[in-house]
Image (cartoon, helix red, strand yellow):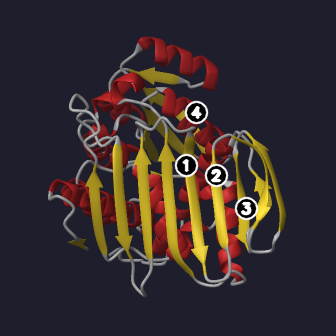
Amino acid sequence: MPEHNDLNDLTVVPKNLHSPIKPFRAVVIGLGEGSERIMLPAIAAHPNVELVAACDLSENMRQRAAKKWHIPKVYDDPIAMLAAEQPDITAIATPPLTHYDLSLLALKHNSHLYCEKPFMPSLPEADRIIDLAKQQGLCVGVNSQYYQMPIYRKAQEILDTGDVGRVYHIDTWQQMYLLPDEEGGWKAALQPRRVLFEFGTHAIDLICRFFKAYPEAVTAKIAQVRVDVNADVCINLRLDFGEGRMANIMFNRMSYAPIRYFEMRLNCEKAAIRTSFGGVARLDLGWNSEQKKPRFRMSFTKGGEVRLEKSGNSKHLLNQPNTAVGDGAIAQFSTFVTALAQEHTRLSYVSHAREVLRVLLAGYESAEQGGELIRL
């Protein structure tokens, strides 16, 4: 378990991003789509961080990013960049299988590290990075920003009031038709460990935060949908928590049903909280069998929504904007920068990411053993 195991500390967004300290000098490694949508905007939005350089193997990406984000220097070699710039913060926005080597490189140049999720390909690599950062007094953060989005913060707010009672069961699911080869890019190369490794981080992260705990055991199964698809395109996990609580995660990327990008239902003692991330357009007129009267529901949002379900009714609480991913990344990075000056929380962020990775990898271990229970 993490040395500092208080998940509440990890959900605080700093109210004031300004401070009297001089700006941190930051560099970015990787200028692809993820960096363009998430990492670069998050760094540019922080008033106490100065983006001094960036690195990518592609000259086109280097020139495009330099022009759009006003980056003073661009490099094609991360070693040369780190040696020349000696940054305070190195942000890594490259494919996950490169994270270990680049993180090691950043820490050896005495730089704080901010890494895209998933954190590392394996636990030994994660532990090596954590140990090295601890030895050098450096901070490591991992960008898993979903919990900073409005719908999940609203869900947490409802739980914290106690009005819905104790959360005892969480359902999480995704359904779409998207084969690995059709998605393309580096994600297509993540086989056979694909969907859970790349996207499951978000689900596990949120579930642990809502339960304020880590699971004690994991069970998983991967469906063999087609013999020519060697990836976890249809995977189901059960997470067992203390006090008789549990969660289910069902990802199906070979489903012909209407697309549901990311759905959650938090079943509590007195009501359920339902979150939908992604576009929602629904008009429903039905019958409430519990109250024996008509039921009406209307939802329309590009970004997502959160609802309260009780007594056969579904009450709309909040829509989030289509920019929620980017806004969440800005808040997540801001929290990381704040942690640089707070020694007691420095390792909280990376320790939490390590535990999420441990659960994720245990899921694969269970599936490879035919669905055996893996105790954590």
Real-space CA distance between mark 4 and mark 1, rounded to the nearest whole angstrom: 19 Å
Residue 255 picture location, percent across and down: 45, 38
Give the numbered dot on residue 135.
none
At horizontal 30% and vertical 49% (from top left) the residue drawn is 120
Q: Pick out the residue farthest to the top.
A: 60
The reply to whether dot 4 and dot 2 touch (C-beta < 8 Å) is no
Type of amino acid at the residue the image marks with label 3: Arg
Q: Nearer the viewer, residue 232 or 228?
A: 228
Give the numbered dot on residue 276.
2
Q: Earlier in the sequence, mark 4 or mark 2?
A: 4
Type of amino acid at the residue the image marks with label 1: Phe
Is the residue 374 above or below the residue 81 in the image? below
Does residue 138 show up?
yes
The reply to whether dot 3 and dot 2 touch (C-beta < 8 Å) is yes
Element at badge 4? helix
Q: Nearer the viewer, residue 77 or 279?
A: 279
Q: Earlier in the sequence, mark 3 or mark 4?
A: 4
Q: Earlier in the sequence, mark 1 or mark 2?
A: 1
Q: How would you rate the neighbour count of disc 2 (Cα within 10 Å): few for under 14, some for 14-19, many for 20 or more?
A: many
Q: Pick out the residue farthest to the bottom.
A: 243
Element at badge 1? strand
Type of amino acid at the residue the image marks with label 2: Ser
Residue 58 picture location, percent across and down: 40, 16
Residue to which mark 4 is pinned: 37
Q: Earlier in the sequence, mark 3 or mark 1?
A: 1
Real-space CA distance between mark 4 and mark 2, rounded to the nearest whole angstrom: 21 Å
Please name which of the two marks, 3 or 4, marks the residue nearer to the observer.
3
